[in-house]
Image (tube, grey):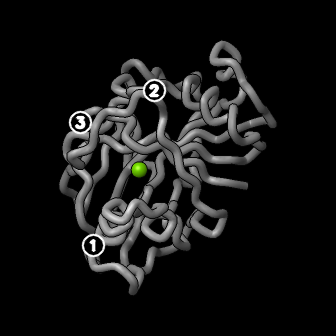
Amino acid sequence: MKIICIGRNYADHAKEMNSPLPTEPIYFLKPDTALLKEGDFYYPKFTKELHFECELVVRIDKVGKYIQPKFASKYYSQFTLGMDFTARDIQQLCKEKGLPWERAKGFDHSAPISSTWVDKQNVDLENATFQLFQNGELKQIGHPKDFIFSIDQLIAYVSQFITLKTGDLLFTGTPAGVGPVQIGDTLTAALNGQELLSLKIK
Ligand code: MG
């Protein structure tokens, strides 16, 4: 199982990061040990600036390579919400030195996801909204209709380079509003008003 994450898929987040809009999808991988399905999250010792990035997550249902956009929707049937935890201080150093992002984004438990999945026929992506709350305060609002690259385009793009397998997860990028996490925080995420994820930071 691998975790494929998309960077800069919302114009408002690219702007808050002072990053240019991508002309083709940007992706990076997290290892399977990044996954956190249940339990608390422990603030890692190697960063002083851990950020939350709430994202819509797609589960890949079958093996595929060179998937055409028009067939991409046959490769997934469920969504959930997850967090692309990012050590922003380390990411900034990596960016300045032109180094890979794995140390900032691919560490253990950097990808918590909800254990509740929602069938795609029950989610109208044109009208869907997801929200991230930090200690009950609304921090991020995401509208998948604002994706720069659609899920189908992302699947087609990534599958040119790597074979997608059953159980792989696609994190589709984060909207604006990312921010620092503190020990003691509770992060909750809801899709169309349904709370899917609740995470305590210890
Ligand atoms: Mg992200």
Q: Nearer the viewer, residue 159 or 189?
A: 159
Q: Which residue in the structure is indicated by mark 1?
A: 49
Quarter where residue 10 is shown: top left
Which type of secondary structure does the marked residue at label 1 adopt? loop
Q: Which residue in the structure is indicated by mark 2?
A: 149
User: How crowded is the residue under tag 3: few (<14 C-alpha within 10 Å), some, or many (20+)?
Assistant: some
Q: Is mark 1 within 8 Å of ligand 1?
A: no
**CA separation in Å, label 3 and label 1:** 21 Å
Measuring 69% from the left and 32% from the top, which residue is drawn there? 160
- N-terminal of the pair, mark 3 or mark 1, is 3
Quadrant location, the N terminus: bottom right
Residue 190: x %, y % from top left: 38, 45
Measuring 58% from the left and 48% from the top, which residue is drawn there? 4
Marks 3/1 in contact by CB < 8 Å: the verdict is no
Left or right, 56 with respect to 69, comes to left
Q: Nearer the viewer, residue 18 or 86?
A: 18
Which type of secondary structure does the marked residue at label 3 adopt? helix
Relative to 28, residue 180 above or below: below
Residue 1 visible in the current orientation: yes
The three-letter amino acid code for the residue at tag 2 is: Phe
Marks 2/3 in contact by CB < 8 Å: the verdict is no
Quarter where residue 108 is shown: bottom right
